Image: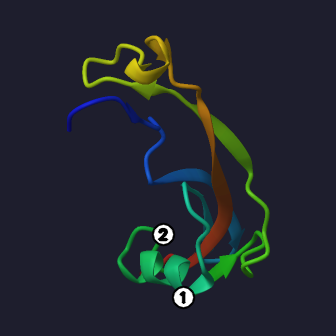
Amino acid sequence: MSGPFYHNPRPQLAIESTYTKNLGRCYNAYGFKVVSRGRLTQKQLQALREAGFLGYGQGFEIKSQCDGTELPAGQDEVLCVNEDGSPGLNKYNGNKPYPAIRQNYWVYEVEDQVDSSD
């Protein structure tokens, strides 16, 4: 890549384990937080589960809003930089730094329920 570019250090998609709890008898629940730089659909979250990234149990529930109307959880301030990490300078405006931009991210909470015999 040549010239300055906007680099968001947040990964496109990140999955964190958030909790484990016993639901009684042989059942346990495992919570996950999915953070994405783009809005996700229920089908995409289900595909992540089917790929094994969000558990493997008999039950699966999306605990947060995921209907296409959810608002971003926040915004990242993204700087314009060169490949070496130095500020990107605009040679057409007297070598002043390019302004930072804001990029949205979304957070989804999901739960996997597992029978301990699995």
Q: In this rendering, is residue 92 above or below 67?
A: above
User: Alpha-carbon neighbours of circle 1 within 10 Å: few (<14), some, or many (≥20)?
Assistant: few
In the rendering, which numbered label is found on residue 58? 1
Q: Secondary structure at mark 2?
A: loop
**Which residue is rendered at x = 36% and y = 13% of the image?**
86
- Give the spatial CA distance, label 2 vs label 1: 12 Å
**Which residue is rendered at x = 63% and y = 52% of the image?**
105
Tags 2 and 1 in contact by the CB under 8 Å rule? Answer: no
User: Alpha-carbon neighbours of circle 2 within 10 Å: few (<14), some, or many (≥20)?
Assistant: many
Q: Secondary structure at mark 1?
A: loop
**Which residue is rendered at x = 66% and y = 57% of the image?**
106
Rendered image quadrant of residue 110? bottom right
Depth check, front residue: 57 or 94: 94
Q: Which amino acid type is shown beneath numbered disc 1? A: Gln
Can residue 21 be seen in this snapshot?
A: no
Tell me the quarter of the image containing the N terminus. top left
Tell me the quarter of the image containing the C terminus. bottom left
Q: Nearer the viewer, mark 2 or mark 1?
A: 2
Depth check, front residue: 66 or 101: 101
Q: Is residue 49 left or right of residue 19?
A: left
Q: In this rendering, is residue 48 above or below 85?
A: below
Can residue 77 be seen in this snapshot?
A: yes
What is the x, y in percent for residue 16? 52, 50
Q: Which amino acid type is shown beneath numbered disc 2? A: Leu
In the rendering, which numbered label is found on residue 38? none
Q: Is residue 39 left or right of residue 88?
A: right
What is the x, y in percent for residue 100? 59, 28
Q: Which residue is mark 2?
A: 54
